[in-house]
Amino acid sequence: MTDDIRTVVIFYDGFEAQAIDRPFGRARSWTRGRLRAAYRTVRRKQLYTGYYTAFLNLVQSLRSLGIEVRVNDFEYARTHPEMPIGISGYPSVFEKVQLENPSVFGPGFVPDPKDLASVIEDCNLKIVTLPSEWPCKIWRPAFGDMIQPMFAPVDISAWPDLSRAEKSVDVIIYDKIRWDREARTADLLVPLKEHLDKRGLTYTVLRYGDHHLSQFKEALRSSRAMIFVCEHETQGIAYQEALASGIPVLAWDEGKLRDPRQSALAPEDLVVSSVPYFDARCGMTFRIETMADMVDRFWQSRDDYSPRDYVAEALSPAVGAKRYLDLLTLARRGA
């Protein structure tokens, strides 16, 4: 489906970069972004938000195919008003990027349906993306097929195979609990740790937002497996980076929507997932009531998985870039 697209203009506005439509705007954004990254590095905080990580992965995947990518280049977009553009990031981007060009939104924050209609008009949106199929089912009843899934590519060359590295820890517990933390600590985290202790399995705990990228990479290098603890994910880049590194994953996956904002919009029968991109090569999933049994089964079969193969096949930059170019083509044809 992809037309002959050689140049892509993508706009991003958020904490790490800003879409500034005035002279030297990109230079100012770059300087601000470097200062923020330096500050967070010193504080040993996570450098980038999930939206920006997804944005960077998308940009790199397009460039890996030889596509010229221009970031926050208002002048170029205005000079080529027929060219489909990308818009991504936080809601501030909708006020800053209102051009004639037909546009594809994502990765980023998708407004509620009651607000999205005006954004579609103001920004000439033809396609609105969410990271996987299940969140698309929330917005699609109101907006139809303009709502499309688009994952952030994961490049296995950036995540070396660590499956045969010397290991000193059995399990990473990746803690991304976001709602009802006290209750989930009592009925999930504490019993999980107690069961691992009973089995004599060692573990390290990484809590989302409270670790540096270097800590995450070191944990992957030194650990045999990951237990991913999150209510649900629209993509879940952290667990996918573990898979890319050859680390099998056991994921807590109740299938129940906990986000109050999404719950107010979602159909009653919506089934969600903490691992929306996952198959038998990656590992296993469990619910609270099956936790102990699934930990045992997973640990027994931990050497039988090939998670890196799954990422290379399903989430590669080449596959992601092709998908995004197809969406840009749809946007141009729908203009």
Image (cartoon, rainbow, N blue to C red):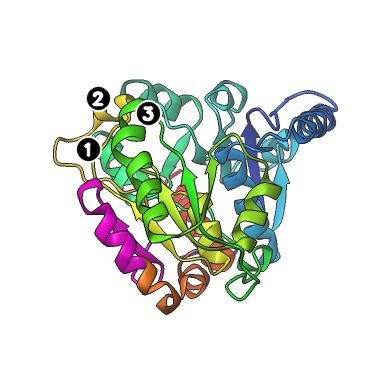
| Mark toward the start of the polypeptide (1 vs 2) | 1
Where does residue 221 sit, x and y in percent of width and height? 64, 62
Q: What is the number of the mark on residue 141?
A: 1
Q: Please count the marks in the image.
A: 3
Where does residue 328 sit, x and y in percent of width and height? 51, 52
Tag nearer the camera, 1 or 2: 2
The residue identified by callout 3 is: 181
| Mark toward the start of the polypeptide (3 vs 1) | 1
Which residue extends farthest bottom? 304
Gap between marks 3 and 2 measured at Cα? 20 Å
Residue 187 within the segment the image draws in magenta: no
The residue identified by callout 2 is: 264
Residue drawn at point x = 59 percent, y = 30 percent: 99
Where does residue 130 sit, x and y in percent of width and height? 41, 43
Residue 286 within the segment the image draws in magenta: yes
Gap between marks 1 and 2 measured at Cα? 14 Å
